[in-house]
Image (cartoon, grey):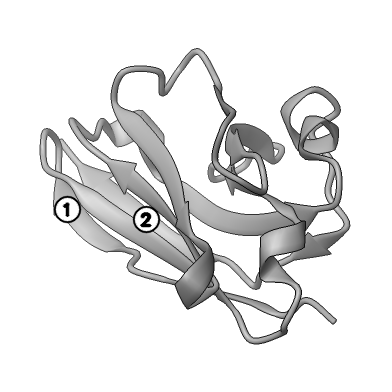
Amino acid sequence: QVQLVESGGGLVQAGYSLRLSCTDSGTTFSKYGMGWFRQPPGKEREFVAAISWNADNTYYADSVKGRFTISRDNAKNTAYLQMNSLKPEDTAVYYCAADGVVMTMALYHSAEYWGQGTQVAVSS
């Protein structure tokens, strides 16, 4: 069973950084691709980034390329999203996700398991 819990959200000024964490309390974390999605206020959920089970492959939305980095530590059952040079348009609820096939998230923007979300707010 996969149970995802996000942390690390908060309020920051534009240009600053945040690192989100997503921890799985289950025992099969290393078998899943991991992803991050976000839902801005009044908008639909959108794909942000994904990483394969062994971290060999990463995928990013164009809007975050060069600013965000996804990573994972299978020994700690944790995935991360390092967010640099934050912009007000990055304001959203950020969701961690897991799927047995990473391309499900990267291409189809769907996932089998979801976290509860963490709020990120960027002020100008």
Q: Are marks 2 and 1 in contact (CB under 8 Å)?
A: yes
Which quarter of the rendered picture does the C terminus lie within? Answer: top left
Tell me how far mark 2 sits from mark 1, CA to CA: 8 Å
Image mark for residue 54: none
Residue at the (66%, 34%) spot, across then down: 46
Q: What amino acid does circle 1 point to? A: Val
What residue is at 29 percent from the left and 41 percent from the top? 83
* Viewer-closest of 117 and 50: 50
Q: Disc 1 marks which residue?
A: 12
Q: Where is residue 79 in the image (x, y as percent from the top left)?
A: 49, 59
In this orientation, which residue lies closer to the viewer: 24 or 48?
Answer: 24
Please report the residue visible at 83 percent of the width from the left and 49 percent of the height from the top. Answer: 111
Q: Name the residue under label 2.
A: 120
The local secondary structure at tag 1 comes to strand
User: Residue 54: percent from the left, percent from the top?
Assistant: 61, 46
What crowding class fits label 2: few (fewer than 14 Cα within 10 Å), some (14-19), or many (20 or more)?
A: many
